[in-house]
Amino acid sequence: MHNNFNNFDRTLSDEDVLRRRATLLQRLHIDGPLLLLLLLLAAGSLFVLYSASGRNLDLVIKQASSFGFGMLAMLLIAQVEARFIARWVPLAYVLGVVLLGVVEVMGHNAMGATRWINIPGVIRFQPSEFLKIIMPATIAWYLARNNLPPGLKHTAVSLALVGVPFVLILRQPDLGTAMLILASGAFVLFVAGLPWLWIGSAVAAVVPVAVGMWYFVLHDYQKQRIHTFLDPESDPLGTGWNIIQSKAAIGSGGVFGKGWLLGTQSHLDFLPESHTDFIIAVLAEEFGLVGVCLLLLVYLLLIARGMVITVQAQTLFGKLWAGGLTMTFFVYVFVNIGMVSGLLPVVGVPLPFISYGGTSLVTLLSGFGVLMSIHTHRKWIAQV
């Protein structure tokens, strides 16, 4: 009995030593590299937004407030273990779908789209943004409860779970967000080990699916965006204006740019949506190729860190969720830069952390809070 008490005391002592050695960031369940990269993006965002918005200080303050709220959400989520979050994933999915249904019935309309829920004097938010976190979590939760790689049945159920919010978001209409939701679920299936034959079959089905969407799903303005993507000069003063001016802004920046607040395309109102979807064109014009490469480097480091967290995750649910979130973030960046530079059709996807937008910002930071939770709780369990 005496030896047992000595062993117990020694174990407690070892745990106490480990806790004392833990850094402040570890105790707060914060991943240092992720936090540093996100703070760099936050500072750069406000810097560029001030110029892109025509020196609108109110807009910058609102964005800074969104960053603050998003950082708080990130820190709170990081404190909660992923296995505890997993218990609430089905409820979150149902709530997300219900909110999308509310948007369908009584959503707030702006610029020809109904995507928001507006509570006058309280808040206006876009429920589809939250599905970017909830969707991969739902597929990860479902697949983690079954044998992997997923068979035909579990793949079909996963696609059905993705399909419901995909259709509801597509009806708003919001093709860009709908495609991101679809990608987030598909990436979890990919990380789960979906057979390559099935992946190849899905790729082969892209053409007939695209044809069907063209005739039965896409709205006229979305079809026009594709026409504009293929030949923007066909309507230089109409639908092709945005992409032509965006390319002009990017090209005029050269290697080092014209300097902060000295961009002409945005400040002379040639470039529409300069503080939202096309903000990287402002960055390219004022800071040149060097500025764009630095931003891409930060994005690359964030994605690399996310993949490291995915590989090191100790639970199947955490691995699948982290992988889905990280790869979806990559698509987020790729689609925005591709559409602004003319490599992809314009689908209304903002540039992560740089474009103005409160709901998107909070959602992105919450996603990185999930990554921190998966990684730092893993490290703590490994230590004790």
Image (cartoon, grey):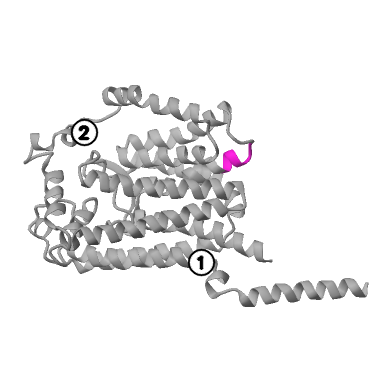
- Up/down of 192 relative to 379, above or below: above
Quick one: SS at disc 1?
Answer: loop
Q: Marks 2 and 1, Cα distance to the nearest angstrom?
A: 42 Å
Mark yes or no: residue 88 visible. no
Q: Residue at x 51, y 60 (%)?
A: 372
- Up/down of 160 relative to 72, above or below: above
Q: Position of residue 165 (x, y in %)?
A: 42, 37
Mark number, residue 30: 1
- Up/down of 20 relative to 289, above or below: below
| Relative side of 184 to 260, left or right | right
Q: Residue at x 11, y 50 (%)?
A: 248
Amino acid identity at mark 1: Ile
Mark number, residue 96: none
Corner quadrant of residue 208: top left
Q: Quadrant of the N terminus?
A: bottom right
Q: Most extreme residue toward the front, as rendered?
A: 255
